[in-house]
Image (cartoon, grey):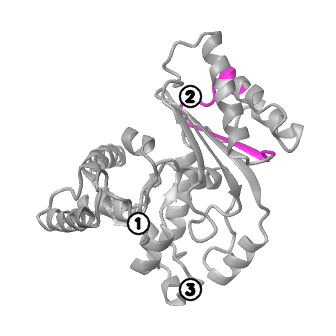
């Protein structure tokens, strides 16, 4: 994941990631053939897929243990960092290997899912997790689309602060639902040396402030309307103060900074998971891509996790 987050984002016209170290079209063809052969043999499709499979398998096992022996995870929404921008193909490689149905595929044909990269990304999940960007009439595709069309666009900064690093993502956001109007945030930055686990002296906090300030200025996002905190360490008071100072005047109103100083309404540790769970629930209840294919709107039984 660290390598993917640190590598340039290079994609092919059909939405697949350009294979690492592939210098020619022949190398790309070999990568595609190798991937299919490995999947046919029941192996991880790629080295990157193998790493992601181990991560998701551990999460799946922990979830099933918490739920009890009678509950198995048979369907899921896999959320990836905006800076990594997992492709539809990579998500399929992971979930298919584990025998888990990808709920984000529901109601979408293969080409549409790949071309639009119908995955759910962390920033969109966080937006949903705080109750934003979600239509009320989600069982009626046309009504939902109309509601989304009336939603105000906000300039949003998503701040993820964990033991291992500090990540920022910013974009104009309307709806949390993936599709043509909601993809991964294009403006992202990660500093692996600014995790909560580092020694936190004044120099450290000064660096956090500068990282936030430089990101907002270089991303040219304009005045930030909303800051969303995520990660197990994002509720730390000194950290929030550093983010506030880093933002300075790059906010649309003073209320943005005042809200940042307060205790978050949703625990930053769970805000992404809450959003993913809400969208997973809606998918299982028949949300799909109803506007394009009304036949996909038939309600499903809520008997899966």
Quarter of the N terminus within the rendering: top left
Name the residue tied to disc 1: 12
Name the residue tied to disc 3: 292
Which residue appears at 68% of the width and 68% of the height? 135
Dot 1 or dot 2: first in sequence order is 1
**Residue 39 falls left or right of residue 100:** left
Dot 3 or dot 1: first in sequence order is 1
Which residue appears at 14% of the width and 68% of the height? 40
Label 3: few (<14), some or many (≥20) within 10 Å?
few
Residue 147, label in figure: none
Q: Where is residue 38 shown, x and y percent of the image?
A: 15, 62
Q: Residue furthest front?
A: 24
Residue extent of the magenta highlight: 223-240
The mark lying in front, picked from 3 and 1, is 1
Foreground residue among 244 and 18: 18
The mark lying in front, picked from 1 and 2, is 1
- Residue 267 magenta: no
Label 1: few (<14), some or many (≥20) within 10 Å?
few
Residue 233, label in figure: 2
Dot 3 or dot 2: first in sequence order is 2
Splitting the image into 4 quarters, where does residue 300 fall? Answer: bottom left
Q: Tell me, yes or no, whether the two marked residues, 1 and 2, touch with CB atoms within 8 Å.
A: no
Splitting the image into 4 quarters, where does residue 202 fall? Answer: top right
Q: Secondary structure at mark 1?
A: loop
């Amino acid at each position: 994941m660290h390598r993917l987050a640190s590598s340039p984002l290079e994609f092919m016209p059909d939405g697949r990631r350009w294979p690492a170290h592939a210098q020619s079209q022949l190398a790309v063809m070999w990568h595609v053939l190798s991937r299919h052969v490995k999947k046919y043999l029941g192996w991880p499709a790629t080295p990157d897929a193998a790493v992601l499979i181990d991560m998701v398998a551990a999460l799946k096992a922990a979830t099933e243990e918490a739920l009890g022996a009678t509950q198995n995870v048979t369907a899921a929404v896999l959320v990836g960092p905006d800076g990594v921008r997992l492709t539809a193909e990579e998500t399929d490689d992971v979930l298919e290997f584990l025998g888990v149905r990808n709920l984000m595929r529901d109601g979408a044909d293969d080409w549409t899912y790949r071309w639009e990269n119908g995955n759910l990304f962390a920033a969109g999940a966080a937006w949903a997790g705080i109750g934003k960007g979600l239509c009320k009439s989600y069982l009626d595709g046309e009504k939902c689309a109309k509601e989304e069309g009336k939603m105000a666009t906000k300039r949003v900064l998503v701040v993820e602060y964990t033991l291992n690093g500090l990540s920022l993502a910013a974009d104009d956001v309307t709806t949390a639902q993936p599709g043509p109007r909601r993809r991964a945030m294009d403006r992202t930055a990660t500093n692996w040396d600014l995790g909560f686990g580092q020694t936190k002296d004044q120099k450290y906090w000064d660096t956090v402030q500068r990282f936030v300030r430089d990101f907002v200025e270089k991303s040219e996002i304009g005045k930030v309307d909303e800051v969303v905190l995520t990660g197990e360490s994002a509720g730390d008071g000194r950290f929030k103060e550093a983010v506030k100072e880093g933002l300075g005047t790059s906010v649309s109103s003073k209320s943005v900074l005042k809200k940042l100083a307060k205790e978050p309404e949703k625990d930053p540790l769970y805000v992404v998971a809450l959003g993913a769970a809400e969208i997973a629930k809606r998918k299982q209840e028949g949300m799909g891509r109803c506007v394009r294919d009304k036949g996909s709107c038939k309600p499903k039984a809520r008997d899966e996790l």
